[in-house]
Image: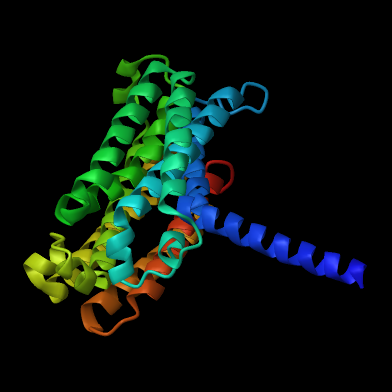
Amino acid sequence: MVFFKTLKNWDKHCTIKMKKLTAVWELMRLEHGFMLALAILIGLIITLQSNDALSFDTFPWKQLILTFFTALFLEASTFALNDYYDVEIDKKNKRKDRPLVRGDLQPKTALYLFFLLFPLGILCSFFVNYTCFIIALITAIFAIIYDVYLKKIKLLGNFYIAYTMAIPFVFGAAAIKQNSSDLIQINLAVIVVAIIAFFSGSGREIMKDVMDFEGDKSSGVKSFPRYIGIRKSNILAAMFYFMAVILSVFPFLFIQFGVYHSNYVYLFLIILTDIIFILTAIQLLINSHMDMARYRKLTLLGLFFGLLGFFLGAFIG
């Protein structure tokens, strides 16, 4: 009997621990961190490929690891800070996917994680190079300003979030640049994939504004739906997705994009992305009762296919 009681207590203890770990993962949105890491890797690989320097023996592993931890720590810390400041709005919006709203974690835990991980992220960027340090520092400062001040001005905040989806590609490219002046020579494919990420990110954020409209309205948040209405906000989000789709075919069509020109591996994966973006855009235009949360998750899958297209296209095709 004692054995079974001990086993039951141990099982209960493990369940509580797993629940806490899951809550910490959700607070820090670590799945986003790994997508950022993939974006950094793509920016780095595209740059190496364009310089005919893509080799396992000479691969800049140190820069890759440091940039990965820079992105992971800064992403995790700023998401934690975001949820700390957003907890009341999230409660009004019934965001049960947020661990602070569910009560699985205390708000002070989010602050502790921010103060632990934020400086670690900045420190990692310092050991990459000066350019990456400046990019990380500026982005991190913007993140704090956004979390503390811009949350109620989503008209600006949306484009900051879109910027954070675009800058990892430039960050990865900058990781192997010797000085800041080299940034003006960043590969055209890096610039295009960053702009695609910015457009799709803008679309996703405006969709989120529509999802959160009622809670945001009662909290005085300045969002697109509040100023131009839900219908026009949906149209605007759709336009961003269409612009991302148009831009995505450029690397396949034009020789200036090097390895991606006439690359059918890239084309296949980017078509999957474009199908998802087009379907989402059409729903935004014709369906006033669409499941916004479902389609936002679907666009995240589309982004993954796009990232995979740029990644695999650098090696095969």
Does residue 24 appear left or right of residue 251 in this picture?
Answer: right
Identify which residue is drawn at 44% across, 20% down.
126
| Of residues 44 and 46, the one drawn nearer to the viewer in this rendering | 44
Relative height, residue 211 to residue 55 (above, below): below
Query: Which residue ends up furthest to the front in the rendered image?
Result: 2
Q: Position of residue 184 (x, y in %)?
A: 29, 24
| Of residues 269 and 77, the one drawn nearer to the viewer in this rendering | 77
Does residue 149 appear left or right of residue 194 in this picture?
Answer: left
Relative height, residue 262 to residue 67 (above, below): below
Identify which residue is drawn at 49% across, 40% down.
72
Instruction: Let me know if residue 143 appears in the view.
Output: yes
| Of residues 200 and 65, the one drawn nearer to the viewer in this rendering | 65
Q: Position of residue 205 (x, y in %)?
A: 28, 60
Quadrant in the picture for the N terminus = bottom right
Q: Position of residue 98 (x, y in %)?
A: 43, 63
| Of residues 229 and 238, the one drawn nearer to the viewer in this rendering | 229
Q: Which quadrant of the figure has residue 240?
A: bottom left
Identify which residue is drawn at 27% across, 85% down.
289
Does residue 227 appear left or right of residue 209 in this picture?
Answer: left
Instruction: Let me know if residue 267 appears in the view.
Output: no
Q: Position of residue 33 (x, y in %)?
A: 49, 46
Query: Which residue ends up furthest to the top in the rendered image?
Result: 179
The colouring scheme, among rainbow, by chain, secondary structure or one colour, is rainbow
Q: How many marks?
A: 0
Identify which residue is drawn at 37% across, 69% down.
95
